[in-house]
Image: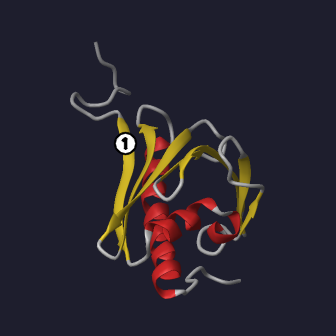
Amino acid sequence: MSDESSMPAGTELERWVRMRRRLNTPPQRVFRAWSDPEELARWFPERVEGGLAVGSRSILVWPDRRVWWEVVEAHPDRRLVVRWPGLVDERLITTVRVLVEPAGFGSRIDLEDGPFPLDQAQVLDAWAEAVEGWSEALALLRAYLDFSVDLRPRA
């Protein structure tokens, strides 16, 4: 039985953001950029309130918003798993997994964020915003680590 609000048959009801990037920076340095509050604030949010130890919940601060970030798992120089809200009203919480592996003289990052269940209101937009946001964030990370440049807009 189907109604007008149901998805077409065969529609994948969950989306994930999955991205892979190559950096000219060793894995230890890449992991530190994600796991050290001072390093994270040099390329992602403007400021981090709190620590980034496993089990902690900190606040990432941008000029226009504040978002909590909860560290679920951390394997030094290898893997970081965090949770955070995918929607402002927190009806959607996603899990971000960052895997860092050696690649030649640098590193490869595999980032995954999700799930984004498409059968919920506003989630398709949240998924599209996450794709755009992570694309920009990984470009900022590369600029910071590989070129020592902060490309974030300044007020």
Q: Is residue 146 above or below residue 86?
A: below
Is 101 on the left-hand or right-hand side of 72? left
Q: Return the residue at label 1.
A: 15
Q: Residue at x 34, y 76 (%)?
A: 105
Colour mapping? secondary structure
Question: 123 or 148, which is in the foreground?
Answer: 148
Q: Is residue 35 above or below residue 1?
A: below
Is 49 on the left-hand or right-hand side of 104? right
Q: Quadrant of the N terminus?
A: top left
Residue most toward the right? 49
Q: Residue at x 31, y 30 (%)?
A: 7
Q: Residue at x 48, y 87 (%)?
A: 147
Residue 69 lies, in percent from the top left, at: 65, 50
Question: 92 or 3, which is in the foreground?
Answer: 92
Hey, what amino acid is under mark 1? Arg
Residue 53 lies, in percent from the top left, at: 68, 49
Question: 130 or 124, which is in the foreground?
Answer: 130
Query: Which element carries disc 1, helix, strand or loop?
Result: strand
Residue 82 lies, in percent from the top left, at: 57, 46
Image-quadrant location for residue 46:
bottom right
Q: Is residue 86 visible?
A: no
Q: Quadrant of the C terminus?
A: bottom right
Image-quadrant location for residue 5:
top left
Q: Is residue 63 visible?
A: yes
